[in-house]
Image (spheres, helix red, strand yellow):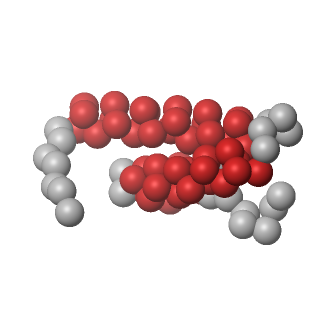
Amino acid sequence: MLGFLFNQRECKELGYVLRKELDEMLFDLKDNRLDGDVKKAIESRYKIVFRMYARLASSKDLSRYARNHNYQ
C-alpha cells in the first residue's frame, strides 16, 4: 500500500481528473460498437477508479457515478 499527502488544491485536481475519467468510461460503456471483452476491461478499470474517487468525494458526488450491476 502506498500513501500520499496532498494539499487541498491537489485533492481538487485529483478529484477532477478522476471524475473526467469516470465520465469517459461511462460514455464508452454505453457504446454498442464495443465488444464484450473491451467492456469487461473498462468495467474492471471503472471499479478501481471509482474506489479511488470514493476516498475524495462526498456521498452526494459519489452517487452520480454509482452503477447498478444489474443494468446491461
Can residue 60 be seen at all in this image of the molecule? no
Residue 32 to residue 4: above or below: above
From the viewer's side, name the closer residue of 53 and 30: 30
Residue ID at (55%, 51%): 46
Instruction: Point out the image quarter for the N terminus.
Output: bottom left
Q: Quadrant of the C terminus?
A: bottom right
Task: Please indicate whether residue 11 sits to the left or right of residue 50 in the image.
Answer: left
Task: Report whether 16 appears left or right of 8.
Answer: right
Q: Which residue is located at x 42 percent, y 32 percent?
A: 17
Please give the name of the residue rendered at 16% of the width and 49% of the height, measured from the top-left corner.
Answer: 4
> In the image, residue 50 lies at what x, y percent?
50, 53
Lateral position of residue 12 relative to residue 30, left or right: left
Q: Is residue 13 left or right of residue 9?
A: right
Query: Can residue 51 be seen here?
Result: yes
Residue reaching furthest to the bottom? 70
Against 51, residue 53 (above or below) is above
Residue 18, image quadrant: top left
Could you say where residue 35 lies in the image, as x and y percent from the top left?
78, 44
Residue beneath the point at 62% across and 40% down: 25
Q: How many marks?
A: 0
- Near-viewer residue (36 or 27): 36
**x and y percent of residue 41 in the render?**
60, 50
Residue 60: x and y in percent read 55, 54
Q: Quadrant of residue 13?
A: top left
